[in-house]
Image: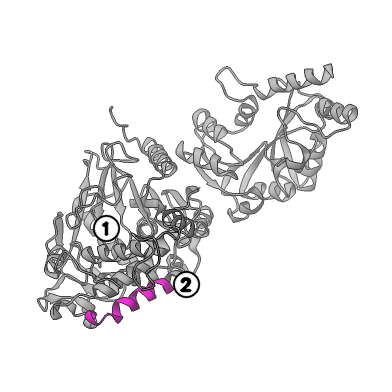
Amino acid sequence: MAEVSATLDTADRAREADDPRSPVVKFGADKPLRLDAGVELAPFQIAYQTYGALNPERSNAILVCHALTGDQHVANTHPVTGKPGWWETMVGPGRPIDTERYFVICPNVLGACMGTTGPASINPKTGQPWGLDFPMITVRDMVRAQAMLLDHLGIDSLFSIAGGSMGGMQVLQWASSYPERVYSALPLASATRHSAQNIAFHEVGRQAVMADPEWRGGRYFAAGTNPRRGLAVARMGAHITYLSDVALHRKFGRRFQDRNNPTFTFDADFQVESYLRHQGISFVERFDANSYLYLTRAMDYFDLAADFDGVLARAFKDTPTRFCVISFTSDWLFPTSDSRAIVHALNAGGARVSFAEIVTDKGHDAFLLQEPELFAIVSGFLDGAAKARGLPSVPR
Amino acid sequence: MMMLSRLKHDLTMAEAARMPGGARVDLVVVADMVEHGAKVLDVGCGDGELLRLLAETRNVDGRGIELSREGVNECVAKGLAVIQGDADTDLADYPNDAFDYVILSQTLQATRQPRVVLEHMLRIGRRAIVSFPNFGHWRIRMQVMFRGRMPRTDNLPYAWYDSPNIHFCTIKDFRELCVAAGAEMEKAVALNPWGSPLRLNAPWWFWNMLGEQAVFRLSRGKKASSE
């Protein structure tokens, strides 16, 4: 594999983990976060971005939950990569999640590396990055931390909460843990539990990271190394699962990259190889390897029904929340059957639920991409909920 | 042939039968059977016209199930609570007494197991409303009698081999199903091809001959009532 060189050094990434270019709320020793692992995390901090304005009634807030490798930079230029926000097609003025009408909050999740406390953050007890001393976290812990952020911001009730993939898991956990605080919910391309196949993919990714000698048992900051190769391989493998056979074939086929004939080497002869290498390399510029381990683990542990003796319907019993569940036909990571299981449980719990499956060949990543039907559905669902809640429409 | 083209024209009129406000007459008849503020499940809700009518005129808490993806996505984009699903398989997931009314509008004939569907409707909802095209209507009978072919009309335009409508029945047949399923008939209305209700107190054979479609409101009962 070609030499993987990061344009950012380790120190720069570490700085973003502790002192991010986002607003930060710090919770001191008096406000510990009680974790599912049975320990308390204190002090800790949450970095977040907001868009639009909170109305005087505080009734127009939408929480956006990011996916595994996302962050809080939903609709602004990313401070590290300089690229547009990851959901600028969905969130912004006049977009389906219209920031002229709604107040959008997106926190960096617990365990991540863009300013919310995670394994790349400094452990106050040692003055060194946490590394593997960071306690194991769950999706429920992420949601608990977000609830503390909303308390701090004075937002009792969310008008809506939206997210795809791991973001959708947070949406479902929110709706189950705090039904009275969630008026409407949009879990996209998600599931109430991580499947065996998905756990298996994550394990391959983690093993790739840990097999990199530069990982150093997770203490790469102290050693001045960075397991770039391992993390890049993990990202390459994962990225395949976010696409589909059809989409890969449409984009790349068997075409060669900058050559007309095979080189009979292990160079990136094929366009698809070159593309994956690029995905891997650009990912390690902005992501912490240990964060990747912790967040994939949190997804693996997610099983909403397990908290209710295996009966998923009880997770949503008599919920007041309005749901809009969306899946994509070519998503084989979080297939429609997973979304349908959510819908069945919601129906059994008497919930008000909409469910749409969108035809696309773009795979799991479709929720992040240009999908006009997705935009029409999200905007129609939110508009219906806004009318029901008495939110004024946008003056235009 | 003169008569047949005339017939086609009449059914086109029925298809377009709408109230001054623009709502389809058969849907208005269904809506009139639902009280204000009720909780309603519309099975086979299409593009959501009935759900919208019920929300606007009856202030109901409405949900829908629709088989076609286009219909579902259109409904959800309108802000209606609709899921993609199949009446034959997905009603089993709903708990008992979840709704005041479960409505099956112009969909009964497309279900694989009409009796099972009807029984689920009366389990999930305290009442069921079913509207369906009456295959006993005299024009349908005429088509079979004089052309010797399966009837095709503007309302029921499919050839027999690609029709989604696999379980046609007449008004008399439907009453028999109600008895078999232990449903009590609370109200029944037959509509002529122009969408007007036929006169009340008419004998069943009259409705069965002249009703182009029928709307029944049912409740759970030990046995069906007789007129």
Relative depth, front residue between A205 and A8: A8
Badge number at residue A196? 2
Relative depth, front residue between A251 and A116: A251
Tell which tag, 2 or 1, sits nearer the viewer. 2
x, y percent for residue A170: 35, 59
A302 to the left or right of A222: right
Q: Residues within 10 Å of mark 2 (few under 14, many from 20)?
A: few
Type of amino acid under label 2:
Ala
Relative depth, front residue between A327 and A107: A327
Q: Are marks 2 and 1 on the same chain?
A: yes
Type of amino acid under label 1:
Ala
A133 to the left or right of A368: left
The residue indicated by pointer 1 is A147
Q: Is residue B181 above or below residue A336?
A: above
Residue B205 shows in this picture: no
A347 to the left or right of A371: right
Label 2 lies in what chain? Answer: A
x, y percent for residue A40: 22, 73
Q: Is residue B23 above or below residue B40?
A: above
Q: Mainly helix, strand or loop, the magenta region?
A: helix
- What span is in magenta? A200-215
Badge number at residue B74? none
x, y percent for residue B94: 58, 53
Residue B177, quarter of picture = top right
Q: Earlier in the sequence, mark 2 or mark 1?
A: 1
Residue at 42%, 57% in the rendered image? A252
Q: Is residue A134 above or below residue B34?
A: below
Q: Residue furthest left?
A: A127
Q: Secondary structure at mark 1?
A: helix
Which image quadrant: the N terminus of chain A?
Answer: bottom left
Label 1 lies in what chain? Answer: A
Q: Is residue A140 above or below residue A378?
A: below
